[in-house]
Image: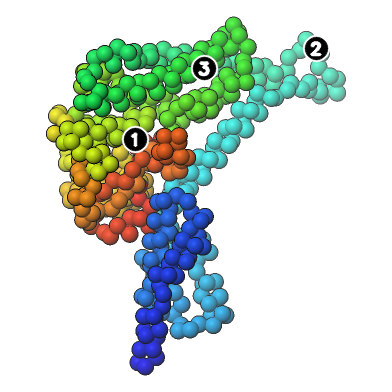
C-alpha cells in the first residue's frame, strides 16, 4: 500500500501535458503537417501519456487487451524485450484503434494496385512486341512470304483491340454533352447580390466547359488517329492506352475535379454532374436538395450559401458558420428548400456505419467499407451560438485519398470541411477509427 501511495504521488506530479506537447508538437509535430492527422496524433498520445497508464500494470491499449503494457512493476530491459517479442508478428487493425474492416481495405488497395501495374505492363509490352522469325523443325528459316501463326495471332489481337477502343471512343463522343451557355444562364438569373448560388452555377458551368472541351478534343484526336486521318501524338497515344486500361487519361486529370474512379465510372459520373447543372439551369431555380458530389469546387457552393444567409440577416459573413442536422428519410422525399441554409445529399461514411433509427454513428458492419450518409441540413448560424453537444467533428473529403495540396484559392484540393455528426461514443473513438465523409467513392 505504501508503494502504491508513493507511485500515485509521483504520477500526480508527472508533467503529462508537457510530455504530450513535447512528443506531439515538438518531436512529431513538424513531420505531421495535416491538421486532421495532428488531431489523431494528439488523441492517441492522450491515452498513452495518462495517469491510468502510469498507475496500472497490464493496461489494455486495444479493445481485446491483446496489446497492453507490461504486467510487471518496474520491468527490466530483458523483461520489456520479452513482452514486445510476445506481441503478434502481424499487427491487427485494433493496435491502430481501427475497425477489422481496415484489413479488407488494405488488401483490396494492394490487389488493385497490383492489377493496375500488371495492366500497364501488358499494355505497354503488347505495343512494343517485335515479330521474330521462327525456325522450322528441319532447321530451315521461314521464307519471307510466309506468316507465322504467332504473327497472325498478334495481328488479330491488335485489330480486335483497335475495334474495341474505336467503339469506346465513338460511344463517349456520342454521349458527351454540349458545352453550357454560361451567358444565357447568367441573363436568366436574379440579382447576384440576392442569390449567390446563381453565381456559383455560372462558375461551375465555366469549370465544366473547360473540362468538356479538353475531353472532346482528346477523343477527336484519338478517333482521327485510329481512322488513319492523323498521326498519334504523345498525349493522344498515352490517353488511348489509359482508356484501354479503363483508366482516366492524365491529360484529362490536369483540368478535372479530383477522382479515383476508373474511366467507365468517371465518364458516367461526369454525365451525372452535367445533368445536375442542366436541371438547375432548366428549372431556373436551385434544387431543393443539393447533390454536393456534383460540384467541381464544393467550397464555392458552401460559401455562397453562407453569403445568402449573411445578406438576408445583415450579419458579417465571417461571424457565421454552418451547424448540421441529419434529416430522416430519403433526399427524394424533400420537395422544398429550407428557409435558411441548404439541404445536402450525396455523402458517404468511411470507417463507420449509420443508425437510421437513432440518427447517429455506429460501428461498421463486417466487410461493409462504406455507408450512405443521411441528408444533412447545413444551417447557417452565428459561430459563437453553435454547440458541440455529443457530436463528432467529421472531416469531409472529395476522394478516399484524403490528401491534397493547397490551391491558389487558399483551399485544399481534397479536404472540404468538418461536419458535426451525432454520436453515442466519445468523439475520440471515431477520431482513432479514422472516420470521414467522402463526396464520392473510388468505384
Relative to residue 392, is residue 413 drawn left or right? right
CA–CA distance between discs 3 and 2? 39 Å
Do labels 2 and 1 touch, CB within 8 Å? no
Which residue in the structure is indicated by mark 2?
144
Relative to residue 148, is residue 205 drawn left or right? left
Element type where label 3 sits in the image: helix
Element type where label 1 sits in the image: helix
Crowd around label 2: few <14 · some 14–19 · many ≥20 (10 Å): few
Tell me the quadrant of the picture where the C terminus can be found: top left
Q: Earlier in the sequence, mark 3 or mark 2?
A: 2
Q: Earlier in the sequence, mark 3 or mark 1?
A: 3
Which residue in the structure is indicated by mark 1?
299
Of marks 3 and 1, the one in the foreground: 1
Tell me the quadrant of the picture where the N terminus can be found: bottom left
Which residue in the structure is indicated by mark 3?
218
Of marks 3 and 2, the one in the foreground: 3
Q: Is residue 346 above or below residue 325?
A: above
Query: Could you tell me which residue is drawn at 20 percent across and 43 percent down?
Result: 381
Q: Is residue 379 above or below residue 287?
A: below
Of marks 2 and 1, the one in the foreground: 1
The quadrant where residue 139 appears: top right
Amino acid at each position: 500500500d505504501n508503494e502504491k501511495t508513493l507511485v500515485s504521488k509521483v504520477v500526480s506530479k508527472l508533467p503529462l501535458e508537457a510530455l504530450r506537447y513535447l512528443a506531439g508538437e515538438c518531436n512529431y509535430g513538424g513531420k505531421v503537417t495535416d491538421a486532421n492527422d495532428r488531431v489523431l496524433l494528439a488523441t492517441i498520445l492522450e491515452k498513452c501519456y495518462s495517469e491510468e497508464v502510469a498507475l496500472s500494470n497490464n493496461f489494455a491499449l486495444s479493445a481485446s487487451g491483446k496489446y497492453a503494457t507490461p504486467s510487471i512493476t518496474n520491468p527490466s530491459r530483458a523483461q520489456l524485450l520479452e513482452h514486445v517479442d510476445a506481441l503478434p508478428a502481424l499487427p491487427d487493425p485494433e493496435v491502430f484503434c481501427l475497425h477489422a474492416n481496415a484489413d479488407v481495405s488494405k488488401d483490396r488497395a494492394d490487389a488493385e494496385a497490383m492489377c493496375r501495374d500488371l495492366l500497364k505492363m501488358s499494355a505497354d509490352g503488347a505495343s512494343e512486341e517485335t515479330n521474330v522469325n521462327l525456325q522450322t523443325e528441319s532447321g530451315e528459316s521461314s521464307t519471307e512470304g510466309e506468316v507465322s501463326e504467332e504473327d497472325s495471332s498478334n495481328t488479330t489481337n491488335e485489330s480486335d483491340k483497335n475495334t474495341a477502343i474505336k467503339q469506346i471512343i465513338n460511344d463517349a463522343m456520342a454521349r458527351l454533352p454540349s458545352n453550357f451557355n454560361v451567358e444565357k444562364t447568367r441573363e436568366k438569373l436574379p440579382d447576384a447580390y440576392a442569390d449567390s448560388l446563381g453565381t456559383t452555377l455560372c462558375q461551375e458551368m465555366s469549370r465544366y466547359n473547360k473540362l468538356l472541351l479538353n475531353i472532346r478534343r482528346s477523343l477527336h484526336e484519338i478517333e482521327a488517329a485510329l481512322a488513319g486521318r492523323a498521326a498519334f501524338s504523345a498525349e493522344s497515344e498515352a490517353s488511348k492506352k489509359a482508356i484501354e486500361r479503363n483508366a482516366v487519361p492524365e491529360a484529362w486529370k490536369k483540368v478535372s475535379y479530383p477522382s479515383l474512379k476508373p474511366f467507365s465510372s468517371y465518364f458516367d459520373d461526369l454525365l451525372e454532374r452535367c445533368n445536375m447543372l442542366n436541371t438547375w439551369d432548366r428549372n431556373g431555380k436551385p434544387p431543393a436538395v443539393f447533390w454536393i458530389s456534383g460540384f467541381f469546387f464544393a467550397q464555392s457552393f458552401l460559401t455562397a450559401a453562407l453569403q445568402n444567409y449573411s445578406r438576408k440577416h445583415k450579419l458579417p459573413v465571417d461571424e457565421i458558420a454552418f451547424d448540421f442536422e441529419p434529416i430522416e428519410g430519403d433526399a427524394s422525399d424533400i420537395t422544398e428548400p429550407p428557409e435558411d441554409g441548404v439541404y445536402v445529399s450525396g455523402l458517404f461514411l468511411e470507417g463507420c456505419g449509420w443508425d437510421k433509427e437513432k440518427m447517429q454513428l455506429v460501428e461498421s458492419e463486417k466487410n461493409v467499407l462504406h455507408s450512405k450518409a443521411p441528408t444533412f441540413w447545413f444551417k447557417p448560424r452565428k459561430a459563437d451560438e453553435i454547440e458541440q453537444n455529443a457530436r463528432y467533428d467529421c472531416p469531409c473529403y472529395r476522394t478516399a485519398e484524403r490528401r491534397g495540396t493547397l490551391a491558389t484559392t487558399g483551399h485544399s484540393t481534397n479536404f472540404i470541411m468538418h461536419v458535426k455528426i451525432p454520436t453515442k461514443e466519445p468523439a475520440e473513438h471515431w477520431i482513432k477509427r479514422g472516420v470521414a465523409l467522402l463526396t464520392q467513392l473510388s468505384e
